[in-house]
Image (spheres, rainbow, N blue to C red):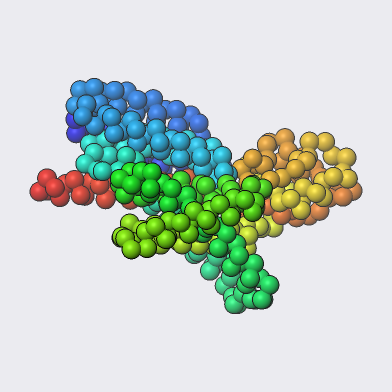
Amino acid sequence: MILCEIFLLCCAFILCGLSVWTDLRHGQIKNKHLIIAFTAGLVLNVIYYAVYCQDCLGITALNLLISALLSIGFYFVHIWSAGDSKLMIVLISLLPGRLFWANTDTIVPAAYLFLLVFSIGYLYLIGEAVYLDFHRHTVKLPTVTKAGAWAAIKSYLHAFVVLYAWNSVLSIALPSFVENNVLLLSLISYFLITILREKPVYHSKVLVGSCAVLDAAVLLLTRNTIAAAGVLRMVQTYLLVLLVMWTTWIAGKYVYESVPTEDVKAGMILSRSTVVCFAPSKVKGLPQISYEDMRSRLTEEEAAAVRRWKDSKYGKATVVSVRKIPFASFIAVGVILFAAYHIVTTLGSWGI
């Protein structure tokens, strides 16, 4: 059993290293690495759960299923790429159930891993933002106007009203589930507000009014019985809304960089303003639209066309690209730290 666990962890750590290398060097995660690791893990997992850890199979399967849905969800809301999504799923499948997923009340223990990965990502964004400000000598307090402040307050209250209503419904309908799966529901809530903010229904007066009425009813009905769970739900909602607004602001400020046109490569994402400049050009194969997310990564043919465009009538020496966030590195570091914590904890419980 221990040998199976060691081999599974070795597969996970090797995949982490390879994925970081290829992501930083080539801007992608190789499918062949994922397939080899998953295949090796599948063989080891069959032996591990069929022979040694039958009692962990249920929680492990459920954890993997919901984690896969979360990973795919992050891809569909364009937070990370398909490669990052597949990497997260394969790595979670390689973590032995007895060491990582057993002895817990939550149905998705991997929610802690997601939290760790995104915490590392946010620390990276903060560090990069500070570095870029100092590097560009642009460290200064943001300009605050009355109109801007009022718009920010309205946006915050709008999101808070919607999210608090959602969390209240869940707490009333599934109180014990909510109590044992706070992190999982936080991730789902993050999905909800991130997706809804881009939809027309989010700005509907009917939705906001209904949520406000529901919030008021919940507060009135529970005013004499506000427990720790209610306070936690309110604080959680405050923090989630702040997180969504902060990441939107930081991304808008530091998302772009200027790149020499001759250095454009496959996998890069060009800004909308750059793609608009291609419209009058007769160069074949240029991208026609940019969503400024993973949907708009350049193919080899499009990258070659952009490089040819440089020397055309409307060409420019530089283009503006969307900065790539190295999520593969965040995932790898998160998995290694997560594994190290659980290994040390397990060894300590064994008295080693």
Q: Quadrant of the N terminus?
A: top left
Q: Please provide percent x and percent y for residue 216.
A: 48, 59
Q: Residue at x 51, y 47 (%)?
A: 191
In the rendered structure, the answer to whether residue 313 lies left or right of residue 244 reads: right
Q: To which quarter of the image does residue 47 belong?
A: top left
Q: Please provide percent x and percent y for residue 104.
A: 24, 43
In the rendered structure, the answer to whether residue 47 lies left or right of residue 295 reads: left
Q: To which quarter of the image does residue 57 belong?
A: top left
In the rendered structure, the answer to whether residue 23 lies left or right of residue 310 reads: left
- Report the label total: 0
Q: Please provide percent x and percent y for residue 293.
A: 63, 46
Q: Residue at x 82, y 46 (%)?
A: 278
Q: Residue at x 40, y 29 (%)?
A: 38
Residue 113 or residue 239, whichever sits in front: 239
Q: Is residue 313 visible?
A: yes
Residue 303 or residue 61, whichever sits in front: 61
Q: Residue at x 16, y 46 (%)?
A: 347
Q: Please provide percent x and percent y for residue 291.
A: 68, 45
Q: Is residue 4 visible?
A: no
Residue 347 or residue 198, whichever sits in front: 198
In the rendered structure, the answer to whether residue 22 lies left or right of residue 352 reads: right
Q: Is residue 301 above or below residue 238?
A: above
Residue furthest left as drawn:
351
Q: Is residue 298 above or below residue 193?
A: above
